[in-house]
């Protein structure tokens, strides 16, 4: 192969990579504590909390479910028919100078009985714990204990969460979706967001 041909192939590959990367992220979303790169095809809203009224959060969803972020839909976010991600500082944790595992116990206090899968991870340069919660695991456990239980109405949801501490402040990054329809489809984009997560103070 001639040097000119190698040079042309290298330039062409670089242009293709730049074009691919330019379509991956649409915009930077940020709070006073952190920022992330939002992938193309996702919409977001700042300070939109499902579970409490404290701010400093970012709620995201794919374009297919964008209407779920409208103010009228705040308490009607139907994850059975959608996908969402919530990234936030958790101001409900009252203890200072606590280890990550203590915060994890607090964050998962309502998940008693759920079969959880844990994995070490890194978020924003800090040690984190990744937790997978799958409602189908719970359904299967109930079926083993009570073979006559009618579980046809139990939703098949998967929640993937990262829990991390930074400067004595706990954070969570949650991704929740319908297990049978959307979880795998949008999971790589959520993982891209996690990889771009940066603390700003």
Image: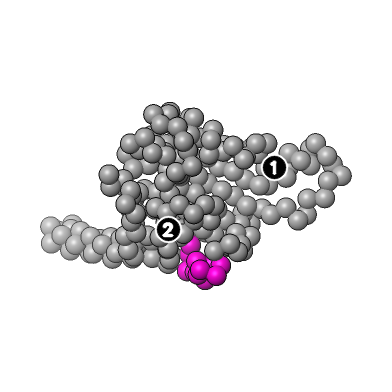
Could you classify mark 1 by the number of other residues whose Cα lies within 10 Å: few (under 14), some (14-19), or many (20 or more)? some
Q: Which residue is mark 2?
A: 47
The quadrant in which residue 47 appears is bottom left
Classify mark 2: residues with Cα within 10 Å, few (<14), some (14-19) or many (20+): some
Residue 142, by quadrant, is top right
Residue 65 vs residue 6, the one in the foreground: 65
Front residue of 166/2: it is 166
Q: Which residue is mark 1?
A: 138
Q: Residue 179, relative to residue 125: is it above or below? A: below
Residue visible at 23% across and 64% down in the picture: 15
- Mark 2, secondary structure of its residue: loop
**Residue 19 occupies which quadrant of the picture?**
bottom left
Query: Any magenta on residue 163?
Result: no
Query: What x and y, as percent, mark residue 61?
Result: 48, 62
Q: Where does the magenta region start and end?
A: 61-73
Query: Which residue occupies the foreground of this view, 177 or 57?
Result: 57
Q: Does residue 118 lie above or below 179 as drawn?
A: above
Local SS, label 1: helix
Q: Which numbered disc, 1 or 2, marks the residue closer to the eye?
A: 2
At x 68%, y 47%, the residue is 136
**Can residue 162 be seen in the rendering of this structure?**
no
Please state if 84 lies on the left or on the right of 126 as rendered. Answer: right
In the image, residue 180 above or below residue 167: below
**Residue 24, position in %: x, y?**
35, 61
On-image quarter of the C terminus: top left
For marks 1 and 2 on the same chain, the one whose residue lies earlier in the sequence? 2
Which residue occupies the extreme left position in the image? 3
């Amino acid at each position: 192969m001639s040097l000119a041909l190698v040079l042309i192939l290298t330039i062409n590959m670089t242009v293709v990579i730049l074009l691919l990367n330019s379509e991956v992220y649409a915009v930077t979303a940020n709070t006073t504590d952190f920022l992330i790169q939002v992938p193309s095809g996702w919409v977001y809203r700042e300070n939109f909390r499902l579970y409490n009224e404290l701010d400093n959060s970012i709620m995201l969803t794919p374009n297919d479910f964008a209407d779920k972020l409208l103010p009228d839909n705040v308490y009607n976010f139907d994850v059975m028919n959608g996908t969402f991600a919530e990234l936030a500082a958790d101001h409900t944790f009252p203890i200072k100078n606590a280890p990550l595992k203590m915060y994890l116990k607090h964050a998962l206090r309502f998940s008693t009985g759920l079969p959880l899968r844990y994995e070490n991870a890194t978020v924003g340069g800090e040690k984190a714990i990744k937790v997978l919660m799958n409602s189908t695991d719970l359904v299967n456990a109930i079926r083993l204990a009570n073979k006559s239980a009618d579980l046809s109405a139990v939703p098949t949801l998967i929640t993937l969460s990262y829990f991390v501490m930074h400067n004595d402040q706990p954070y969570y990054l949650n991704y929740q979706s319908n297990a049978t329809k959307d979880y795998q489809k949008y999971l790589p984009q959520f993982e891209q967001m996690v990889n771009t997560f940066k603390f700003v103070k």
